[in-house]
Image (cartoon, rainbow, N blue to C red):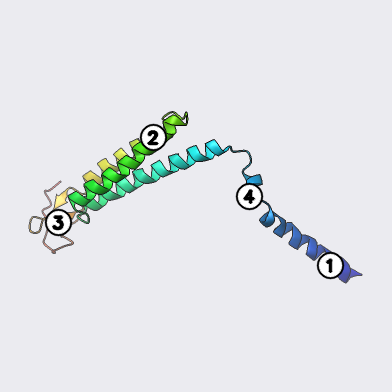
Amino acid sequence: MIEIIAYILMVLCIAYVLVPLFRPHHRLIAHKSANQNQWHEWLYRKRVALEIIADLEFDRQTGKLSDDDYRALKDHQQRLMGQLDEKLNRAGGQKDELSKRLMAEIDKAKQQLAQQLQQTCPQCGYRSSAKAKFCSQCGAKLDDKQP
């Protein structure tokens, strides 16, 4: 008798764990409309484009990316952001506070990065961190007086 009760409890526990896995996904997000989902997707894609631009700026300043490649890749991301802005505006979404905050964060990060990467090697011209004492490219001693 105890074995039967234990077996029934085990089956119920397994069923309790597995039932949510077989529920249709649309029931879990039924409270969101399709327009809201699309709008959030566009905002997410815009944020990703902004992050890509920040990464491109970092790669250009560290010498990993040429100026021509940087401009081409940055222009592509900016065109993408312009298209996303048009979609957001057509969908009735105003430029929300999130987009403005993201742009402010990107600008702040660019300024901080520019301050950190101001030191160049007098021998090879490689851009190094302002805190570096030696060039990571050629090993030359960097001047302590540089900003």
Q: Name the N-terminal-most of marks 4 and 2.
A: 4
C-beta proximity under 8 Å, tags 3 and 4: no
The residue shown at (39%, 41%) is: 46
Q: Is residue 144 above or below residue 82?
A: below
The residue under label 2 is which amino acid type? Asp
User: In the image, is residue 120 above or below residue 99?
Assistant: below
Give the alpha-carbon distance from disc 1 to disc 2, as whole Å.
59 Å
Q: Is residue 103 above or below residue 23?
A: above
Image quarter for residue 33?
A: top right
Query: Residue flagged by tag 3: what amino acid is it?
Result: Tyr
- Do labels 4 and 2 touch, CB within 8 Å? no
Task: Specify which label sits upstream in the sequence, 3 or 2.
Answer: 2
* Label 1 sits on residue: 6
Query: What label sits on residue 141 in the rendered view?
Result: none
Asked whether 92 or 103 is in front, the reply is 92
Nearer mark to the viewer, of 4 and 1: 4
Of 74 and 100, the residue lying toward us: 74
User: Alpha-carbon distance for marks 3 and 1?
Assistant: 71 Å
Dot 1, crowdedness within 10 Å: few (<14), some or many (≥20)? few
